[in-house]
Amino acid sequence: MDDAKVGSVFRAVRIRRGMSQRQVAEAAGISRAVVSSIERGLLEHTSMRLVRRVSTALGITLELEARWRGAEAATLLDERHARLVRAVVTRLTGLGWQAFPEHTFNVWGERGSVDVLAWQPATRALLCVEVKTKLADLQDLLATMDKKRRLAPSIARAEDWRPLVVGSVLVVPAETWARNAVDRFDSVFTAALPERTANVLGWLKTSDRDMRGIWFLLNDARGSAKRRPGGSMRVRPRAASDPSARPRSASIPGGPQTAPAASRGPSQGT
């Protein structure tokens, strides 16, 4: 985070809103000296808690991003995302799709990547899959998916595909937190992604129309995932031959959302 740039933005927004430092301080419940210190880029002289209070008073969205050796940090932290991507590729491949994880594109200057781009030659269906292990910014998520869906025919033509139908699917873990998040914003998700798991799986077999939906995917590559208070748990059923045996569980690490290394060729399920 560029402290000087943050301070400049805070000052510019305050002036645009016609507020004095004292007014901002009163709205944030802090001293004017703290506001002045932030605007001068002296963030190390205050706490993040106070900086966030000022950002809230000014209507500024403050994001803190940690980086380490470029993409290596994302790979290190986002093991769950990578596992879920592999599970999607495995399922699609098993249904006869050609699946390409982290497929990059550059269409009319719009660059990006699709977590999983899949092609079904038999029905000439194209599928764009967005994989999420957490739902943070709903507006940004839906805007990103809409953009990729809009660019999908052009992305396909770059691979010499001529799709007749296009599918756009959000894949999230089949865990309680994900279902609760979708239920909480049901009207928004229903308008943008109306289909749910059963219909999505049916479409993957027929691909007879355009489709938008949400797929709650159980990643059983390392056991069934259950969301419990305090974290995700991996549970093994009790062995029938040993009545005294108890289920064992282990934490599954979480992390930011970044896909595995880019690949241009079809991935084989693992």
Image (cartoon, rainbow, N blue to C red):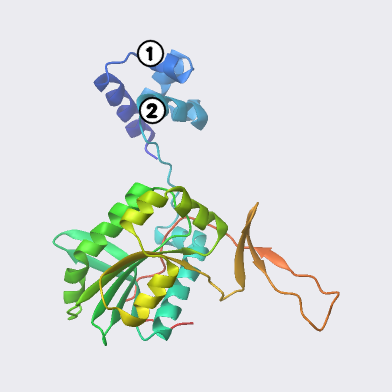
Residue 260, horizontal then vertical, whole percent = 42, 68
Circle number at residue 54 = none
**220 relative position to 16: left or right:** right
> Which amino acid type is marked by label 2?
Gly
**Above or below, comparing residue 228 to residue 202 in the picture:** above
Quarter of the view holding residue 56: top left
Identify the image quadrant of the N terminus: top left
Q: Are marks 2 and 1 in contact (CB under 8 Å)?
A: no
Quarter of the view holding residue 123: bottom left
Of the numbered discs 2 and 1, the one sitting upstream in the chain is 1
Between 35 and 197, the residue placed more toward the observer is: 197
**169 relative position to 236: left or right:** left
Residue 32, horizontal then vertical, whole percent = 43, 14
Q: Which residue is mark 1?
A: 23
Q: Residues within 10 Å of mark 1 (few under 14, many from 20)?
A: some
Q: Give the total of numbered labels.
A: 2
Comparing labels 2 and 1, the label whose residue is closer to the camera: 1
> Which amino acid type is marked by label 1?
Gln
Between 218 and 205, the residue placed more toward the observer is: 205
Residue 216, horizontal then vertical, whole percent = 47, 66
The kind of secondary structure element at disc 1 is helix
Q: Which residue is mark 2?
A: 41
Please name the residue shown 25% across and 74% down the image: 209
Q: Residues within 10 Å of mark 2 (few under 14, many from 20)?
A: some
Do we see residue 81 in this rendering? yes
Between 62 and 188, the residue placed more toward the observer is: 188
The kind of secondary structure element at disc 2 is loop
Residue 75, horizontal then vertical, whole percent = 46, 63
Q: Residue furthest right?
A: 244
